Image: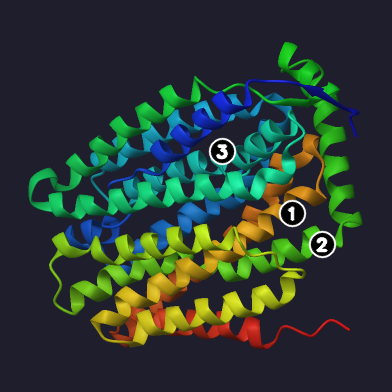
Amino acid sequence: MSKERVFPMNLPKQLRAVRVYSFTSCLRLTDAVWVALLAARGFTLAQIGLAEAVFHLTSLLCEVPSGVAADLLGRRLNLAVSAVFEIFSDVTMAFSPNLAAVCAAMALKALACTMISGTLEALTYDSLKTAGRENEYLQADAKISVLQKLATALGSLASLLSDVLQFAGFYLANATICFCSLLAVLTLQEPLVTEAQAARQQSPFADIAARLRVHITDSAAVLRTTPLAVRLITADAIISLPSYLTTMFVQQRLVTLGWDASWLFVSPLLASAAAMVCTALARRLHPGKLRPLYRLCALVCGGGVLLAGAGPAWGCLVGPMLVQASLSVWFLHAMQRFNDAIPSDRRATLISVDNMAYSVLMIPASPLIGLIADVTGLAGAGLCALGGLVLLSALALPRRK
């Protein structure tokens, strides 16, 4: 492990830049309607689930390598490249003639997302560490999370434009916003808290093969010697499953219940609002142990998924609110504990391992839930199965002696 050494920066300016980037990178016009947009073009739920599985397969393959790249080459560079890939993804999707092109666009989007995940958290935590203020990460992360959810909520309003933008218009508008994210990245500064990071800043590709071998060995050693990190990775993967799948399949369920596509923004908008409120409230919580917190959050999350899958139209609104509210509380505290437990030089890599575990579960889960919906003819059947799984994880959690 590299010796820690503080290289100060203008922290207030850095945190402002992080917040601007966080907002623009989450302002996506298609996230609330992409399933409905593809379904309107004739794709089945199973095909859409397959495209989502391609997304998570790409995430699985690229998650950890992208984290390694962030640690070895620089977090700021990773975020810039991510914005470029996202632009390519949106342009590809805008002009996609078939399922293969849709899957290619999803793969590019996944690659962009993997380069953000782990990288942004590491950049934020280490920026605070340059000022010896890493104990303020929970507060800083909460503010960033609220901005991200606000951007998501605003993006969901784009469904009101479904009569104006059409399919290609949504994705080309997304590409324009991604370019703004790229401009925001350029205002960031690379945080340096170890001598190795300072040396990397001068020559990012120097001795890259040797550094890569040491990096992989040391990262594996951290996981072997830090049981808390492994437990958090497992818990995060399980409770995260409903996060996107609920949003994804509620879209089609609302359509089958008679909702017009222009009103699909209501569910993600309310879910984002619930997440913002609970994130703000969760900052005031100080749980001594995470085990009881996980049990409570998993029970609320699983119940929300069941409500979204089996309830009437109002259940499709309240269910996702419960899901996102519980996830906001859990991840705010889980990520603080996770960051405290791992070293700066391996931070982006190990957070990427955490995200990779989620992708491992999502690869079979996404098409399976879509298949259950197609076979039963009920858009919410797969969600009911997913909700039962999350509830089981809470009820089966052993009490620690």
Badge 1 crowding class, 10 Å Cα cut-off, few under 14, some 14 to 19, many 20 or more, is many
- Indicate the amino acid at tag 2: Leu
For the N terminus, which image quadrant?
top right
Mark 1 or 3: in front is 1
Mark 3 or 2: in front is 2
Q: Is residue 85 left or right of residue 260?
A: right
Residue closest to the eye, 129 or 185: 129
Figure check: 358 above or below 314: above
Circle 2 sits on which residue?
Answer: 228
- Indicate the amino acid at tag 3: Met
Badge 2 crowding class, 10 Å Cα cut-off, few under 14, some 14 to 19, many 20 or more, is few
Tell which circle, 1 or 2, labels the residue nearer the N-terminal end. 2
Q: Are marks 1 and 2 in contact (CB under 8 Å)?
A: yes
- Indicate the amino acid at tag 1: Phe
**Quadrant hosting residue 320:** bottom left
Q: CA distance from mark 3 to mark 2?
A: 24 Å
Badge 3 crowding class, 10 Å Cα cut-off, few under 14, some 14 to 19, many 20 or more, is many
Secondary-structure class at tag 1? helix
Residue closest to the eye, 307 or 95: 307
For the C terminus, which image quadrant?
bottom right
Question: Which residue occupies 32% across, 62% down?
Answer: 268
Circle 3 sits on which residue?
Answer: 115
Q: CA distance from mark 1 to mark 2?
A: 8 Å
Circle 1 sits on which residue?
Answer: 338
- Which residue is farthest top? 202
Residue 63: where, in percent of width, then height? 62, 46
Figure check: 295 above or below 178: below
Tell which circle, 1 or 3, labels the residue nearer the N-terminal end. 3
**Residue 203 visible in the displayed image:** no
Residue 271: where, in percent of width, then height? 37, 65
Question: Which residue occupies 66% across, 60% down?
Answer: 333
Question: Which residue occupies 84% across, 81% down?
Answer: 400
